Amino acid sequence: SVNPDLASERQTASFSVEKLTARLDGGAEHTQIRRAVVQAIECDPVFSRENQYFQSQNERYEAAVRKAVHLQKKMHEMGWTENGPEFKYIYRALSGDVAFLLHRIFMRSILVLGSDKQIAKWIPLATQYQLIGSYAQTELGHGTYLQGLETTAVFDITTQEFILNTPKISAMKWWPGDMGRSATHTVVFAQLYIHGKCYGVHPFIVQIRSLQDHSVCPGITAGDIGPKMNFEHIDNGYLMLQNVRIPMENMLNKFCEVQPDGTYIRRGSQKINYFTMTTVRISLISDEVIIPLMKACTIAIRYSVVRRQSKLKPGEQEAKILDYQTQQEKLLPQLAAAYAFHFINEYLQELFDKGYREIQRKNFDTLPELHAFSSGFKAMVTQYCTSAVEICLRACGGHGYSLLSGLPSLYTKILASCIYEGENTILLLQTARFLIKCFMTASAGQPVPPSVTYLAAVKPGKCPAKNKLDFLSPDIYTEAYQHMAVRLVSSTAAKLQDLIQSGVKKHDAWNQCTVQLAQAAKAHCHYITVKNFAETVEKLETKAGIQKIMKHLCDLFALHGIFSNAGVFLHDGYISGAQMDMVTASYLDLLAVIRKDAVPLVDAFDFTDKNLNSALGSYDGQVYQRLYEWAQKSPTNKQVSPAYERYLKPLLHNTLSKM
Amino acid sequence: SVNPDLASERQTASFSVEKLTARLDGGAEHTQIRRAVVQAIECDPVFSRENQYFQSQNERYEAAVRKAVHLQKKMHEMGWTENGPEFKYIYRALSGDVAFLLHRIFMRSILVLGSDKQIAKWIPLATQYQLIGSYAQTELGHGTYLQGLETTAVFDITTQEFILNTPKISAMKWWPGDMGRSATHTVVFAQLYIHGKCYGVHPFIVQIRSLQDHSVCPGITAGDIGPKMNFEHIDNGYLMLQNVRIPMENMLNKFCEVQPDGTYIRRGSQKINYFTMTTVRISLISDEVIIPLMKACTIAIRYSVVRRQSKLKPGEQEAKILDYQTQQEKLLPQLAAAYAFHFINEYLQELFDKGYREIQRKNFDTLPELHAFSSGFKAMVTQYCTSAVEICLRACGGHGYSLLSGLPSLYTKILASCIYEGENTILLLQTARFLIKCFMTASAGQPVPPSVTYLAAVKPGKCPAKNKLDFLSPDIYTEAYQHMAVRLVSSTAAKLQDLIQSGVKKHDAWNQCTVQLAQAAKAHCHYITVKNFAETVEKLETKAGIQKIMKHLCDLFALHGIFSNAGVFLHDGYISGAQMDMVTASYLDLLAVIRKDAVPLVDAFDFTDKNLNSALGSYDGQVYQRLYEWAQKSPTNKQVSPAYERYLKPLLHNTLSKM
């Protein structure tokens, strides 16, 4: 039975939840396929995440391996293939709780960097799981700066082998997933030396564990890097190499080759593969970032209409906490952001598909723009969504702090997305470099890529809004974002120029502008996101109330951004103090409007209870009952307190006689 | 041996680290006592936290009980008493990793709410640990709103007992520390009923577990609420009561009494005890909030001078990451905040000591002001420090994400401080209520408490700064903060008035202003913090370079606040866009100045390696070595992969012949 406080929220939906779900999925037929996958996975007990919050790192790892193995069987049974329409829903249905993800990266790196002969040898073995692969790039002392890697691979001309070594502790491979305990092979990135000359970083296939008894191979030291904030199910590992010899054909050599006499040959263009790597940043946004935010919103908003606390009006019963303006102001902007990022993700996917087709036709012109997009949006979206999930967690008070709410795991996992696949600050600065370059080019009257032509059209002007309703016009706020982005890019470009002209060296000048450069890159991405949301709303069908509610969310996303970053809009007077008061008024009004549809808006994300795995967020809203039921299953309740016999009993003298 | 990259940072300190430490401790003699306590605790293996990051919830709990028991012995051995100068350092030395903290609250509540007879009976038993107490207030469905508690205590006139019940699931006690597995007794807060009439919430002593075999008593259901984001060492518990009968003398009856015939009598003033509860919010700020931030700064800053990544200047070796402006901008404002909050904490302690003396003389005039202080600063400092610790964590990239860095635990623990002892938003609104009231009073020409007289002195004006150096004048920025706080309080008061005058009901009007009210309360606390920091710097000794470096930190804290909240300063034109550029310039300049002393500034916090318990933050900076050593101790490396035999072996066919 559904909690009546939750049920009542669904009766007043201003739009068709089912139609919105179909729109989010890209069509009702996709919704159907997704639900079928979810259903098949969730009815299979092997994939259960029921006890996840009670498990140790060892247990999580074992379960993830079990699931990965079982998934092979399941896919075969269900007739799902890697190229089928079901595939993209599997990972989502499993909530990513599965091992051997690096095995896929191992295979991809061979497909991308290996010769036909290498592909023919290794891919069938990997496909049939006759080995388990990993990908060993990051070192203890080296993450983002690839050229700084210290592992060495020296060509031994006499034996026609490479000798791999970890010359010092900072060169130890550190972090590779699946490597700590599972992998038998890995692609090691190492500095190639021939006749004492260094040729830079190259990839080598190295066997690290026996295929017979799984013991580590001679010269190999490998293990698990220990406990992390999340990802307990993944055996991120370390690897040290001591005079490990591998045959010369184990260097992946599609783009370069070492000949038997030690001659080094480089060939072909890596551009397309560089592009492949770039797309990883875009592909992670949906599964690893937006879906977790949608889950967090679902949990926090459902909880906030079931939880009653204090009285809003004297004499009435305690109020649903979502009826408090402060709670709305915490949660509803995050909900709007989840939609904003869903739509920008669609936009990016399309952009990259188009880019890929161009690149296949050997047109590499869009590469810098796509790189800037993938860097900037990866950074901006991961950062925004991480903060948003944290806000959802905090907004649930004490119960949000319990692992059983599901929110702590969502937070500790999404947080990693700010670091992996490019640390966010570094990525923002790459986008900034592109923006500054384009701004200079545009200022010189030269053509620039379509996404940044706006930089050329610097209009001074002021915001024309005259009352708070004007700020519900997408033209008004999109223009404000654009103005702000241009100002931040142009003023930072000017500062950079000034510094250089005043004699500061180029790299020092750059470093002295980086705080502002990162801000400018974020502003650019924020502007594109708002613009895209507004354009998406335009194109939505007007029936079934969907366009109307999406328009409200778009307005909220845009005005929340102005309200929370007021300084950058007020700075040059584009928006005046009086106009900022109008923004605030419209923004607060919107909260009350959207609050009415809050539950239907999260229902549209269509998470099953099993997929949410939250005692606070289930569809029926029976929060307290579920917290109690789940708590009883905790291992802390499964044994007599180990502390009692040993420590408490000697303390607690029999005092009955005295009482 | 100290990592040379860290050692070099210490050679150029502009001030005496030892003297700054002494200042932070409140005198060299306190430093000496603190170090002696730390030394005594750390040389005792029972108190070791060495394997903490590898332990399960059960193991953490057991260790915390062991430590609590051993601490009694240790205190006796060392001659430490609860009133001695050592006492306040013990909890810090243990990093709070100890059980039975609620036992102390149990005792305090009896001392405060109990009659002399009750004190005479229970306190000796508790002191000698012949029972273990807890404090059962919060319920599954009720946290901040005490009047909403649902547990009932019905007076049975025939047996002269109270009958306690949990009428529904939302009434179940939930969260009380030490109650899940340890406590034998607890103070239960329940609605008192006599002859069917409800007299509101009252405290009752209830035995929940046998003193002989620790089994739960008849009518009691109790257990552990399960896994949380942190506090694994505490057995936060649940408790359900079914017709549990307790003798009538178990109602704590200093302030009210039920007579045998059911007559209810209330007596005395609870004001002083209300004050006692208020001080808890202040007392937690140091141990639970500021010290964790100091630890996070120590870890992140030491790591940032040892970690080298990418090149700042072409041709040179990779740069220390603290040399990047973006890294400075992440960490140094947090360092400044740690000092700012240390000093505001000193100020608050003094204020409350003074208030306590007044109240003992039956002068209750300062109570509303002290309540507003304790609420606002608890909320503001916990929120600020939680964000700051998160920034430190993120600034350490992948290694920060490892539990071995110590940062995840600091973050997941400090996060709880935003929720417990009053949820922050609710606290801010209490402060706001005080501010609005004082503003109204002041506007009417009536006197107001000293801390808010500034609200009366509304000066329109503009910031007089003419160049970036002017913004290094405390008068200039303190004035700006004051102006901003006055504006936010007065404009929100005006909005509230307008709404009410336009016919909106008072409670609705209040709700519609709460987002802005919370902002105003934060602004008030921020202003007081800046002002206090500036005044503290004034009074510091000019010798040994301490005043100079503290002045820099004060400037940084103030300018960072203006830079990050630019909107509220620009809004009415008090600070112009051009002046904001000066703020930004001075702010960025300061980063480079303070960066030189960053390591000495964290060294002054004087944490031992054992107390930090961080592979990244140790005094010698041997980061990579320690990460490797610690990782090897992980339980994930202590057994053959459980997944291998069961899942991997069947997968991995012998492929040697094919390779």
Image: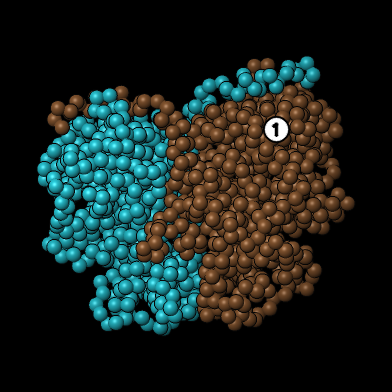
Chain colours: A brown, B cyan
Q: In this rendering, would B176 be left or right of B247?
A: right
Q: Is residue A410 in view?
A: no
* Numbered circles on residues, count: 1
Q: Residue at x 83, y 34 (%)?
A: A115
Chain letter of mark 1 equals: A
Could you tell me which secondary element the residue under label 1 belongs to?
Answer: helix
For the C terminus of chain B, the quadrant is top right
Q: In this rendering, would B537 be left or right of B648?
A: left
Residue A413 position (above or below residue A257): below
Q: Which of A106 and A586 is in front in this view?
A: A586
Q: Residue A162, how many percent across, how many down?
A: 73, 28
Q: Residue B584, how many percent across, how many down?
A: 51, 69
Residue A413 position (above or below residue A238): below
Q: Residue A578, how many percent across, how many down?
A: 52, 80
**Which of the 4 image quadrants contains residue B312?**
bottom right
Q: Nearer the viewer, residue B523 or B496?
A: B496
Q: Residue at x 33, y 70 (%)?
A: B435
Q: Is residue B266 in view?
A: yes
For the N terminus of chain B, the quadrant is top left
Residue beneath disc 1? A103
Q: Residue at x 62, y 19 (%)?
A: B645
Give the amino acid at mark 1. Answer: His
Q: Which of A586 and B350 is in front in this view?
A: A586
Q: How crowded is mark 1: few (under 14 residues within 10 Å), some or many (20 or more)?
A: many
Residue occupying the far right of the picture: A361
Q: Residue B588, how many percent across, how many down?
A: 50, 64
Q: In this rendering, would A633 be left or right of A344?
A: left
Q: Residue at x 65, y 33 (%)?
A: A43
